[in-house]
Image (cartoon, helix red, strand yellow):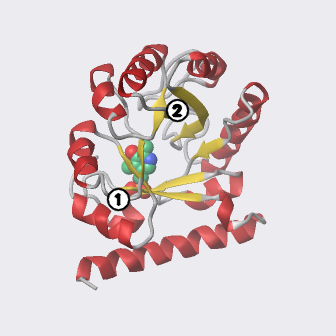
Amino acid sequence: MTQRKDELAGNLAKVEERITAACVAAGRKREEVTLIVVTKTYPASDVRILSDLGVRHVAENKDQDAAPKAAECSDLPLTWHFVGQLQTNKVRSVVGYADLVQSVDRSKLVTALSKEAVRAEREVGCLIQVALDAGERERGERGGVAPGGIAELADLIAAAPGLRVDGLMTVAPLTGEYAGRELAAFERLMDLSTDLRRAHPAANMVSAGMSADLEHAVAAGATHVRVGTAVLGVRPRLG
Ligand SMILES: *Cc1c(COP(=O)(O)O)cnc(C)c1O
């Protein structure tokens, strides 16, 4: 093994242990939680190594980095998640490689995603990004719709050709009533997911938890955790 492969294998094993321990503590089965490795700012060569090591889900947050990387890795059996704030002028590119977009937070984005999915003859899974620090009906600083806007967006996605409502995503808020209370934030997301599933029973994905707080996400009931730093290392630049 190369040095980088050794390093990534070791980090992955540690993350795997953390997820397993969190599942045991929560009385959940390990298969209930899917690891998504956030490869943003890291090269395609790392994505290739991760794929060799058995990773099947990767995530990116900036189209200009993600598009060439996904093209270089198009031979790998990977599911690509887009998790960053998305401008409508990037939607055509993102739909070219993303199987799921986890950052759907406004109707304009739904319209653009639907149009491009139809054009590309692809089906794109959508997670609604929830901002737990936004006022009712507002959007969050770092993207996301306030809880009061979820139902309307879900109905729009469900009615949009080429799109599928898959569930909810959140990032633990740094401000507001949930600041520093990751478990409470993720439990709130689970309650919102229960509400969503009354109208959209198949929308059962709950994406929450990153390197620092994945245990809280698993404890709350998340189905997907998004881990970057703990697998790849501290990012060389902001992303
Ligand atoms: C970068 C990022 C992650 C991963 O964060 P780490 O702290 O590096 O694990 C997860 N989710 C989103 C939306 C991100 O942008």
- Judging depth in this view, the residue of 185 and 148 nearest the camera is 148
204 in relation to 41, above or below: above
Instruction: Give the amino acid at mark 1.
Output: Leu
- Judging depth in this view, the residue of 86 and 188 nearest the camera is 86
Instruction: Give the amino acid at mark 2.
Output: Cys
State the residue lying farthest toward the bottom.
Answer: 1
User: Can you give x and y, in whole percent of width and height, for residue 77 in the image?
Assistant: 41, 58
Q: Quadrant of residue 25?
A: bottom right
Q: Quadrant of residue 42?
A: bottom left
User: Can you give x and y, in whole percent of width and height, for residue 142 in the image?
Assistant: 41, 32
Q: Residue at (62%, 53%) from the top-left corner?
A: 217
Numbered circles on residues, count? 2
User: Can you give x and y, in whole percent of width and height, for residue 73 in the image?
Assistant: 28, 55
Q: Residue at (66%, 39%) from the top-left corner?
A: 189
Dot 1: within a 10 Å radius of its alpha carbon, few (fewer than 14), some, or many (20 or more) residues? few
Q: Residue at (34%, 42%) from the top-left corner?
A: 61
Task: Determine the secondary structure under disc 1.
Answer: loop
Q: Which residue is mark 1?
A: 76
Q: Describe residue 32's horizontal placement relative to residue 16 as left or right.
A: right
Dot 2: within a 10 Å radius of its alpha carbon, few (fewer than 14), some, or many (20 or more) residues? many
Mark 2 or mark 1: whose residue is earlier in sequence = 1
C-alpha separation, residue under disc 2 versus residue under disc 1: 22 Å
Task: Determine the secondary structure under disc 2.
Answer: strand
Q: Residue at (54%, 72%) from the top-left corner?
A: 16
Q: Residue 126 bears which disc, if any?
A: 2
